[in-house]
């Protein structure tokens, strides 16, 4: 039996060149486990004004297949191993992740976690078969405008897409480490024929966002 072919590790620059992400950040993520889909980076725990935690994570597809339907669950535990809270992801961009590539998302905890909590992640995904249910749009532009990120995305597929069109903004520190995450929606949310576009504005208000990457996705044919 021959050994499996080595998977070439992709970069966020590859996703930007393909149009599935746009922005001014250029983070460098670890390779992760060979043959696995796993979390390769996460932001420090930060409790927001509502007493909740939205924790940005980066997932690497270390398999030799294109995957989709990425989901991450997280458990926050104390020094004794006691489970403090359980959270789950709210979508990833890009939604379709080639072999070796990285996808960005966040895990939401409905709890005020201590910053010393240890985080344990479990990742689930599915190999892409046929047309994807979650379809990435090509992000034509993404701009920092005051406290907001604005931009435009186009249906570059050959299928009609259905809304709503989720806009996932991930913020990074100047050193490329994960900082924050915010989700919004593009307009209009009507069906998009191939070549048609949507625009978006996602506001971070008082949250810092020194550099960022944006992904946009809708729903493909069932």
Image: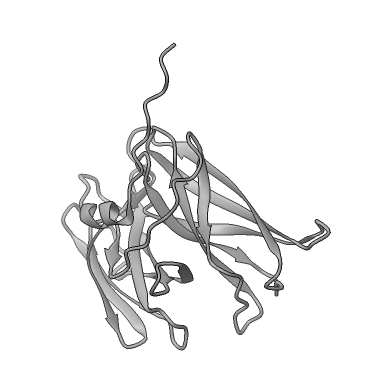
Q: Quadrant of the C terminus?
A: top left
Tally of marks: 0
- Above or below, 186 against 40 in this view is below
Q: Nearer the viewer, residue 138 or 122?
A: 122
Q: Position of residue 156 (x, y in %)?
A: 20, 52
Q: Residue furthest front?
A: 175
Coloring scheme used? one colour
Q: Is residue 102 left or right of residue 119?
A: left
Q: Quadrant of the N terminus?
A: top left
- Above or below, 2 against 115 in this view is above
Q: Nearer the viewer, residue 221 or 127?
A: 127
Q: Position of residue 3 (x, y in %)?
A: 42, 19
Q: Residue furthest top?
A: 1
Q: Position of residue 88 (x, y in %)?
A: 60, 57
Q: Measuring 28% from the left and 70% from the top, which residue is drawn there?
A: 24
- Res. 155 in view: no
Displayed quadrant of residue 20: bottom left
Q: Is residue 65 left or right of residue 14?
A: right
- Res. 197 in view: yes
Q: Measuring 37% from the left and 45% from the top, which residue is drawn there?
A: 97
Q: Measuring 33% from the left and 69% from the top, which residue is drawn there?
A: 186
Q: Measuring 38% from the left and 58% from the top, which residue is drawn there?
A: 28
Q: Position of residue 165 (x, y in %)?
A: 35, 62
- Above or below, 203 against 131 in this view is below
């Amino acid at each position: 039996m021959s050994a499996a072919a080595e998977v070439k590790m992709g970069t966020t620059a590859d996703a930007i060149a393909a149009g599935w992400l746009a922005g001014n950040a250029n983070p460098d993520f670890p390779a992760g486990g060979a043959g696995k889909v796993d979390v390769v980076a996460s932001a420090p725990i930060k409790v927001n004004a509502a007493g909740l935690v939205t924790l940005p994570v980066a997932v690497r597809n270390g398999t030799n297949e294109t995957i989709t339907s990425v989901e991450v669950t997280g458990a926050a535990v104390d020094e004794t191993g006691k489970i403090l809270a359980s959270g789950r992801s709210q979508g990833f961009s890009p939604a379709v992740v080639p072999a070796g590539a990285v996808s960005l998302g966040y895990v939401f905890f409905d709890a005020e976690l201590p910053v010393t909590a240890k985080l344990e992640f479990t990742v689930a995904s599915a190999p892409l078969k046929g047309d994807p249910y979650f379809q990435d749009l090509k992000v034509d532009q993404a701009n920092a405008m005051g406290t907001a990120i604005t931009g435009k995305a186009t249906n570059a597929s050959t299928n009609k897409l259905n809304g709503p069109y989720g806009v996932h903004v991930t913020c990074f520190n100047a050193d490329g480490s994960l900082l924050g995450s915010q989700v919004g929606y593009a307009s209009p949310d009507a069906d998009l024929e191939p070549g048609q576009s949507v625009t978006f504005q996602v506001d971070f208000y008082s949250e810092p966002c020194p550099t960022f990457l944006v992904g946009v996705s809708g729903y493909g044919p069932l």
